[in-house]
Image (cartoon, helix red, strand yellow):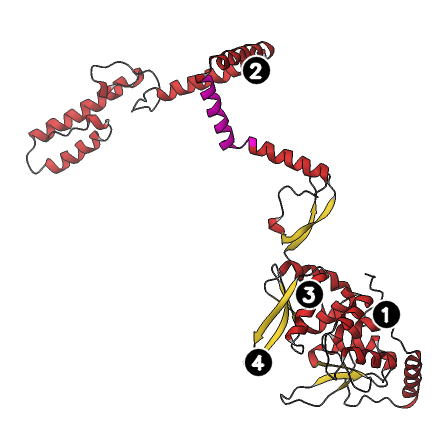
């Protein structure tokens, strides 16, 4: 595949497509001499040949007289200008405006002079007077360059739809038969971009065939043809959110993934697939598997079962532990320190908690277990119990009018005692 060398000229902003394509005066004489020289040459340049072959799969047409005709809607006038710039040496006039169609819309167009190069293409692409896709026609495209011709084909008849991060590509082949569309599908697939025919039923009841490319094939084809596509038609190739470039984590060499994935779905440990990197990846995966919690738990269970049933295994285990303790005294001391710290924390957590100050410590023994508090909180507990008993006596001695207020004070005093001491006597 060669690089694109043709510059894409900008259409003059002040250019107005006239109704007549004819030139006049000295300009017409110069253009006539240029066309006669190109026709006498008898061949097309490489860029011209790719344009004509690619657009013959799309909107291009060659008349029986050997003239190449291009016509596009008004929104694609700049795209037509690019085609006219490339084929200008075969065109007598200038791009012009056509009459209004049945819908009241106009199109822009131009046509070339009759030339032997176009007549030879006509014989291959129109064997019975109708444009057909044949093996000979596809072989011509292969010789000219598949990617370069496909760029013009997609610019003419390509349709990208779907989300930007998950696009698909349709190639409109409505003018071809189903057998021709299948031949095109096999041809494109052989070039590394799998596709298949897709039948569409129109509102009129007619069934038409199209080519359908899935996301990864569509994106790779769009990336390949972008360089050879006119800038005004690259809106059909906009793709974001997909990536197939990765860097091997073992040898740090860049490589392309076999399938196109979202950027968020890139492999965690990409591997380029070389023998050394593949073995390193296998070792890493094995190590990760061996250190997984489930596998570690199974190993521990098998080890405990072996030590429980095999006396020799127990003896070997003891000897290994003694040898390891002699050779790693620092680790043994660190292990003992962590163990004692853990046991002290467990003992502290198991101590009862004083319900007054909330501290966990050895509580003072008491005649009643539900009144056990720390030594410093004993006076506070006695004060609370005395306050509770005081309001109990007041409630018993009171009459009905004062009972509500005394009961409320008694309930407040009860809240400051443990639940086993909140026994209200009425």
Q: Is residue 239 above or below residue 378?
A: below
Q: Compare marks 2 and 3 and give the one earlier in the sequence.
A: 3
Q: Pinpoint residue 255: horizontal percent, then vertical percent.
A: 72, 47
Give whichever of discs 1 and 3 has the lower sequence position: 1
Per the image, the residue denoted by label 3 is 186
Pointer 1: what residue? 46
Q: Compared to 63, does 137 lie above or below?
A: above
Q: Residue at x 15, y 28 (%)?
A: 391
Among the 4 quarters of the image, the one containing residue 43 = bottom right
Q: Which mark is residue 206?
A: 4
> Residue 103: which disc?
none
Q: Nearer the viewer, mark 1 or mark 3?
A: 3
Q: CA distance from mark 4 to mark 3?
A: 24 Å
Q: Is residue 155 visible?
A: yes
- Against 367, residue 42 (above or below) is below
Query: Disc 1 or disc 4, which is closer to the eye?
Result: 4
Specify which label sits upstream in the sequence, 2 or 4: 4
Q: Nearer the viewer, residue 67 or 251?
A: 67
Q: Residue at x 8, y 29 (%)?
A: 396
Q: Is residue 97 left or right of residue 31?
A: left
Residue occupied by mark 2:
331
The answer to whether mark 1 and mark 2 are in CB contact below 8 A is: no
């Amino acid at each position: 595949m060669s690089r694109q060398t043709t510059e894409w000229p900008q259409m003059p902003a002040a250019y107005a497509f006239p109704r007549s394509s004819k030139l006049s005066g000295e300009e017409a004489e110069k253009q006539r001499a240029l066309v006669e020289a190109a026709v006498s040459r008898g061949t097309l340049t490489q860029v011209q040949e790719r344009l004509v072959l690619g657009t013959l799969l799309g909107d291009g047409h060659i008349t029986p007289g050997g003239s190449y005709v291009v016509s596009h809607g008004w929104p694609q006038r700049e795209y037509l200008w690019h085609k006219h710039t490339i084929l200008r040496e075969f065109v007598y006039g200038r791009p012009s405006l056509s009459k209004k169609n049945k819908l009241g819309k106009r199109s822009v167009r131009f046509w070339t002079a009759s030339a032997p190069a176009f007549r030879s293409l006509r014989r291959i692409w129109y064997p019975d007077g109708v444009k057909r896709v044949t093996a000979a026609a596809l072989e011509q495209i292969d010789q000219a360059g598949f990617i370069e011709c496909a760029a013009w084909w997609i610019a003419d008849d390509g349709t990208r739809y779907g989300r930007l991060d998950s696009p698909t590509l349709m190639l409109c082949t409505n003018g071809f038969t189903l057998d021709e569309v299948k031949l095109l599908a096999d041809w494109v697939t052989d070039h590394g971009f799998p596709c298949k025919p897709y039948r569409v039923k129109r509102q009129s009841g007619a069934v038409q065939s199209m080519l359908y490319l899935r996301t990864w094939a569509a994106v790779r084809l769009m990336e390949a043809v972008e360089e050879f596509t006119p800038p005004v038609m690259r809106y059909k190739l906009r793709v974001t959110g997909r990536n197939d470039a990765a860097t091997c984590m073992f040898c740090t060499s860049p490589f392309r993934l076999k399938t196109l994935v979202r950027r968020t779905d890139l492999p965690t440990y990409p591997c380029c697939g070389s023998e050394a990197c593949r073995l390193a990846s296998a070792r890493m995966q094995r190590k990760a598997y061996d250190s997984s919690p489930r596998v570690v738990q199974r190993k521990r269970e098998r080890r405990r079962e072996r030590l429980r049933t095999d006396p020799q295994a127990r003896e070997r285990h003891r000897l290994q532990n003694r040898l390891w303790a002699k050779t790693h005294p620092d680790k043994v001391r660190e292990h003992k320190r962590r163990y004692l710290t853990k046991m002290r924390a467990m003992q502290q957590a198991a101590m009862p908690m004083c319900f007054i100050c909330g501290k966990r410590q050895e509580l003072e023994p008491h005649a009643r277990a539900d009144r056990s508090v720390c030594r410093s909180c004993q006076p506070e507990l006695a004060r609370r119990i005395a306050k509770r008993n005081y309001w109990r006596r007041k409630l018993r001695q009171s009459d009905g009018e004062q009972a509500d207020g005394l009961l409320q004070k008694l309930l407040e005093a009860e809240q400051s005692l443990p639940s086993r001491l909140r026994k209200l006597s009425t």
